[in-house]
Image (spheres, rainbow, N blue to C red):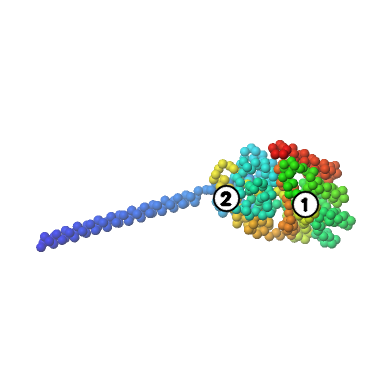
Amino acid sequence: MKKIIVSLLILVFLVSMIFISVGCKNVETTVTTEAETTAAAETTAAAETTAATVEKPTLTFWVMPTTGDAYLHLYDKFQKDTGYKLDIITIPVPFEESTLTKWAAGGRPDIMEFQVARNWFSQLNPEENLIELSDMEFAAKTKYDMLKVNFDNGKVWGPILTAPREFGILYNKEIFEANSLKVPGNFDEFFELCGKLKDLGITPLYAAGQDQWPLDLYTMSFALEDLKKNPNWWSDINSGKTDFTSPPIMNSLEACKKLIDAKYFQDNLLVGTYEEMLSSVMEGKVAMAAGQNSSIAQMATEYGEAEVNQKIGAFGFSLDSNCVGWYSSVSIYVPKTGNAEKEAAAKDFINYITGPAYQSYLDEAQAPSMLEGFTDGKVSITAKQELHDYFNKDNCPSWSQGLVASWGPLETLLQEMWAGTKTPSDVAKTLSTEFAKNAKAAGIEGF
């Protein structure tokens, strides 16, 4: 009996040891699994922390000296929202020449502001030096055919987000209202209006002959109608099939000469300045002057929006209609740098500024949207809105917008025409000669 009891105790002991052994193995297995899980979690967390603290690349960005606060604030917003950094380098005046000098020396930023006017843009040699952006979302949203007008062959090199320089006629509303005068709808009515003003003892128009460049606002306006009638003019002149003696330019120059001969400009037109032009219209010393949307904004800065809203109106103008002309929109390009990471980051920048953040620029700049799907910024200057309303009804790019080569010293030639030392034909022939010479030097086919 004792042997049986002893045997049973031994058996129980052995079974217990087996259970204890198995239990210990299970405990050891559980402890090992938790340790491995904890280590794995710590490794993952460390990796995530490292990824989060890795700095995104800094992008070099060439910008114009006239880039406004609304754009600079948009660029700051990009940095804050994305973690990218921008090394913004302001290219000095003269902007286009300074940019092209750096470009020719091999300088390549990651992003750059630059003109879309072809005589400047073509000098970047985009096919070789820029990343084409046709596949980006903004390309399908761009309004007013801006991309088609500015970039040929169906390619897109950058977004156009800034409203172009819209030009037309600025006028003193108080003079018009006091004399029951109406906005003219064509050149004949315009010429007749100038005659009425002169008979009233009021100088009809202002010419900034000393500064020269504002004179071209008249020639650009008066060429619009012929450009609309002959949209192939740009391709014809760029290929040498025609020249500046053709109707858009000649008709425009002759219209200007008719106003000059009728003495509808102020007496001191050869010493007239752009600043004095704006003040003369504002103060009622002259009734009208060719100007642009930026002119209206400048007047508001100098005189205050309330006074400008009271005194200044604007309308589009060409030979046969109230068409508004425009020129020199600026785009933002992505140069080829060979750095894939930065090139991808630059495209992220383009996506950002053409995405929802674009609305913040429109609101601050009080600017009309160049992309579908956004609300125009509310414009508080009525004349600026009036000019854009005419633009929405009927617009056409300036004759200079689509030319592939330089056409020489136009402003000086216009000054000489206003002075009476050159005829419209003289101006047109000189422009033709200069354009052909520069096109040939650039290797453009047809010259």
Q: Residue 391's spot in the image, x, y percent?
A: 73, 56
For badge 2, the amino acid type reads Asp
Q: Which of the two residues, 211 or 427, is positioned nearer the viewer here?
A: 427
Where is residue 341 shown, x and y percent of the image? 54, 45
Q: Nearer the viewer, mark 2 or mark 1?
A: 1
In what quadrant of the picture does the C terminus appear?
top right
> Residue at 62% across / 42% down in the picture?
129
Q: Residue furthest left?
A: 1
Q: Does residue 328 appear in this view?
A: yes
Q: Residue at x 22, y 57 (%)?
A: 17
* Of the image marks 2 and 1, the number of the one nearer the N terminus: 1
Residue 302 visible in the displayed image: no
Task: Say which residue label 1 marks.
Answer: 225
Q: CA distance from mark 2 to mark 1?
A: 40 Å
Please provide percent x and percent y for residue 85: 57, 48
- Foreground: 179 or 194? 194
The amino acid type, in three-letter code, at marker 1 is Glu
Residue 300 sits in which quadrant?
A: bottom right
Label 1 near label 2: C-beta < 8 Å?
Answer: no
Question: Mark 1 Cα within 10 Å, few/some/many (few <14, many 20+)?
Answer: many
Q: For residue 289, which numbered disc appears in the image?
A: none
Describe the element under mark 2 as helix, strand or loop: helix
Q: Nearer the viewer, residue 61 or 120?
A: 120
Q: Which image quarter holds the N terminus? A: bottom left
Could you say whether the residue bearing mark 1 is in a helix, strand or loop? helix
216 versus 4 height, above or below:
above
The residue indicated by pointer 2 is 348
Judge from the rendering whether residue 108 lies leftward or rightward of residue 181; answer left or right: left
Farthest right residue? 199
